[in-house]
Amino acid sequence: MYAHFKLYKVKPIYFWVVGFRGFLLRRLVTMAIVLIAVATINFLLFQVMPFTVLKINPGQWFLPIVNPSARQNAAYIEAERAKIIATLGLNLPLQERYFVYLKAMFTFNFGYNVGSALTGPVSATILRFAPYTILLLGSSTIAAFVIGIFLGVYSAGRRGKWQDKTSFVTSLFFFAMPSFWIGTILILLFAYDLKLFPPDAAVSFSSYTGVAYISHVLYAMILPFCSLTLISVGGVYLIMRSTSIDVTTEDYIFMARAKGLKERVILYKHILRNAILPQVTNFALSIAFILSGAIITETIFGWPGLGYWSYQAVVSLDYPLEQGLFFVIAVMVVVANFTADILYGFFDPRIRSG
């Protein structure tokens, strides 16, 4: 009887601790700790900036830039500034301002742009230019993973043959090339020599509206899309090829060949499905970094995404925009890593039980 009672009591606790629910709970706690740590580092990083040298007042971060025509009402402006400073705790000691900062960050109140390039709330700036980055980086990331995964499996199935050698050298070449070099070559060849695409994306579609605007945006996106896809597909291909080669040595692959299954079925049904698991984390982190934008690529092609405006924030000393972008990117990476861990635990029971 005691043995049955012990089994009844211990079994539910055991499955809660080492089962999927316990695995999920541990990951949630870890994610919360990492988010707090990232927010703290982001806070301290911008507190030690040499503001006196750069002549920037941190108290202005959360203050909107006043319209020059409203300078006549100086008393009202100063009253509003004082009110906002008191509301956001910018007049408080460092340790108290830290908790005000945490509340502001986790409610996505990033303050106001203080640089010379942009005005208005930082959150509005991110929402305004994020769609351009999501469109460009999202489409190129998906294309790179689809091409890299299937090309990697195909190359592994023809290991040592000319198809494998050609795809390996080509992918490695574009993977090793810097993004600014590929972008410059594409602009010189297709924009200036052949005149097929615009050299400055934003200029080419900024004057259009409606359906014409959408078509010109997609047309101007072709060159930066190709540039990002070329430099991204190599990394996916190399990982997929390596893991696919490892899977081909497994016993169940030899058994499948012994059963007389077609090589195409073995390649895309057995090898692909088992070699694709390491790409889950890779894809999740790539999606998470979308909002960071491809700074170099967007700047070269004049694509008005968050990557381009991140560069402008550095140039114009717009630290509230930088801080907001850093925090949003960090949150997306942590959440994406959490999602990848959950998918891993769902697909592979050994991970959630260990």
Image (cartoon, helix red, strand yellow):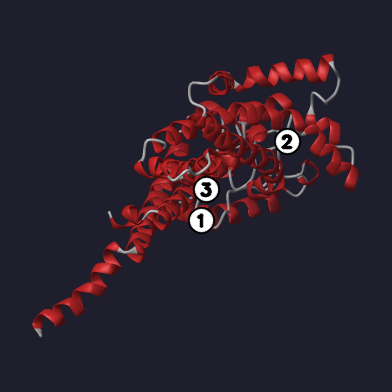
Amino acid type shown at disc 2:
Pro
Q: Quadrant of residue 247?
A: top left
Image quarter of the C terminus: bottom left
Q: Which residue is mark 3?
A: 332
Q: Which mark is residue 185?
A: none
Q: Quadrant of residue 225?
A: top right
| Element class at badge 2 | loop
Q: Quadrant of residue 25?
A: bottom left
Q: Which residue is mark 2?
A: 304
List x then y, in percent, for residue 124: 68, 49
Real-space Cα distance between discs 3 and 2?
21 Å
Residue 209 visible, this angle = no
List x then y, in percent, for residue 315: 63, 27
List x then y, in percent, for residue 14: 24, 68
Q: Residue at x 85, y 17 (%)?
A: 194
Near mark 1 (Cα within 10 A), the count class, few <14, some 14-19 or many ≥20, is some
Question: Looking at this rendering, what residue extends furthest in the bottom direction?
Answer: 1
Q: Which residue is mark 1?
A: 106
